[in-house]
Amino acid sequence: MATWDGAITLRPDGYFVPGVVQWLTGDNAGRENEVEEYDAATGTVTLVIPTYAEIKAGDTFKIRRDCDKSKSMCKDYGNLLNMRAEPEIPRADGTSLQTPGGS
């Protein structure tokens, strides 16, 4: 995992998870990395996969919060009506599905 503790606007812990860092300048320009973790106390962003090239002082990026397709995140985005999911349907566990007569 690659970590970088740059100066970004502080948000609550985990705010950018799931999320993506898009590199604008430097040796990583044009590439994207998925966010593994965000620590608000330190402003540290941890990436799922290390960057292609070393991150250097002056490299710029955009970081965005992605949707995890949950009902609560759709509410946060004001997009619940367009969710196209059925979050109220209960999910069965795998063992009861494989048991004859299981419910």
Image: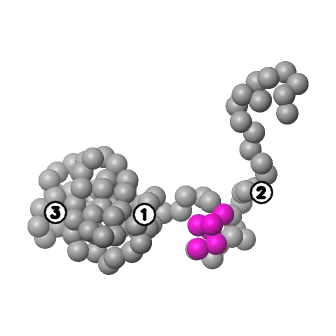
Number of residues whose C-alpha sits closer than 10 Å to that of mark 2, classed few (under 14), some (14–19) or many (20 or more) = few
Q: Residue at x 22, y 65 (%)?
A: 5
Cβ–Cβ below 8 Å for labels 2 and 1? no
Q: Earlier in the sequence, mark 3 or mark 1?
A: 1
The answer to whether 7 is drawn above or below residue 96 in the figure is below
Q: Nearer the viewer, residue 101 or 62?
A: 101
* Mark with earlier residue (2, 1): 1
User: The residue tagged with tag 3: helix, strand or loop?
Assistant: loop
- Amino acid carrying label 2: it is Glu
Which residue is disc 2 drawn over? 88
Q: Please give left or right for residue 36 compared with residue 79 in the image.
A: left
Asked if the residues shown at circle 3 and circle 2 are in contact, with their CB atoms under 8 angstroms apart, the answer is no
Residue type, numbered disc 1:
Gly
Rendering coords of residue 62 (x, y %): 32, 70
Residue identified by numbered label 3: 26
Judge by depth and name the residue closer to the eye, 12 or 53: 12
Mark 3: few/some/many CA within 10 Å (<14, 14-19, 20+): some
| Quarter of the figure with residue 23 | bottom left
Q: Residues within 10 Å of mark 1 (few under 14, many from 20)?
A: some
Q: Nearer the viewer, residue 19 or 27?
A: 19
Callout 3, which amino acid? Gly
Q: How is the image coloured?
A: one colour
Farthest front residue in view: 41
For image coordinates 33% across by 64% down, the residue present is 39
- Residue most extreme to the right: 101
Q: Which residue is located at x 64 percent, y 72 percent? A: 75
Residue 36 at least partly seen:
yes
Question: Farthest left residue?
Answer: 57
Residue range highlighted in magenta: 71-76
